[in-house]
Every structure is written in C-alpha cells, then in structure tokens.
Amino acid sequence: MIANLTPRERLILTVGGLFVLLALAYLLVWSPYRNAMERFDSQITSRQRQMGEIQQLRQEFLRLNQRIAQAEAQLARARSFSLFSFVEEAGARIASRENLVSMRPQPASEQNGFREEAVEIKLEKIRLDQLVQLLYEIETAEAFLRVKNLRVKTRFDNRSQLDATLVIASLGKSQ
C-alpha cells in the first residue's frame, strides 16, 4: 500500500507521522517531566521556607530554655530571700526611715506550686527620683519581685514631694 503512494504523499505521510510522534513525545514525556520538575522546585522552595521557620522556632526555643534556666536559678537563690526585710531595708536606704510610714504584710497565696507573698508599703514626702530608684531596686532584686499596685499622689503642701503606696509581691516555690 505504501508502495502505491507518490513521493509527495510519502513525504506528507512521513511529516505527519513525525508530527504525531513529536506530539506524543511532548504530551507523554516532555510535558509530564517539566510539570514534575516545576512541582519539585516549588516543593524545594516550600521546604526551604519551612526549614527557615524551624530554625527560627529552634532559636526561640533555645532562648526560652535559657530564660527558664535563669528563672529557676533565680528561684533557687530566692529561697533565703525575705521580702519584708528587703522592702524595709531598700525603703529606709532610699527614702529614709522617717518617710517610711507603714509596712503591712498581705496574706500569702499559693497556686500551682508557687507561693506569692506581698507587702504594702506607704512612703510620704519622697521625691520622684527616690521613687524611681526604689522601683529600680525592686526590678533588679535577686528574687522575683513585682509591683502589684502603685498609687502616687503629689503633696498639697509641697508639689515637688510625693506620697506613694506600693504593694510589692515576691514569687517563690512552695516548700
């Protein structure tokens, strides 16, 4: 049957066959290969982004572990810490004993294995820099201290002096 074809028909049949063969090669081999490579490239990009996120999470985890270790060390050092004596000593040293009007212990509370003790302290006729220095002392103490409540009023007789009431709390492990 091919022998009966003219050279022109053979050429058209050969070109048509090559076209079908190339189309099949493109559709069955090249196109799936290219799609798979694009998919792999996008997966590589996605995995690299995920690795970056994992590295960030790892760094944050290590930082938090370090903070936990520091907090546990601070709790261990704070076992012999006395909130009442610390507040009395810091208040007297910064503001003087005459300005330290009262110190009243608050009821202790216990929760989740931690004990919170609090002291209310009243200071009169102090300067702003003395109050700031006291707050700094509380912030940098060797134990976990925080100011739960702070009320500051200017004095009516001398506007440069303040009356302050602070509730200072310490946190420690329960025995």
Image (cartoon, helix red, strand yellow):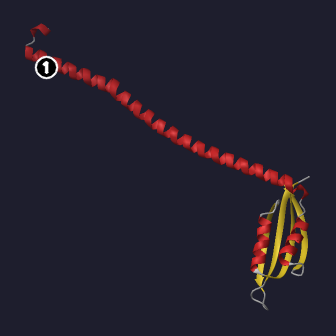
Task: Choose top left, top right, bottom left or bottom right for residue 123.
Answer: bottom right
Residue 25 visible within the image: yes
Name the amino acid, label 1. Answer: Ile
Residue at 21 percent of width and 23 percent of height: 19
Assign the N terminus to one quadrant of the image: top left
Task: Choose top left, top right, bottom left or bottom right for residue 10.
Answer: top left
**Left or right of residue 47: residue 104:** right
Callout count: 1
Q: Mark 1 highlights which residue? A: 12
Q: Where in the figure is residue 156, as x and y percent of width and height?
A: 78, 90
Q: Nearer the viewer, residue 51 or 127?
A: 127
**Left or right of residue 31: residue 4:** left
Q: Where in the figure is residue 102, as x and y percent of width and height?
A: 90, 77
Mark 1 surroundings within 10 Å by alpha-carbon count, few (fewer than 14), some (14 through 19), many (20 or more): few
Q: Where in the figure is residue 66, as x and y percent of width and height?
A: 72, 48
**Left or right of residue 58: residue 129:** right
Residue 147 visible within the image: no
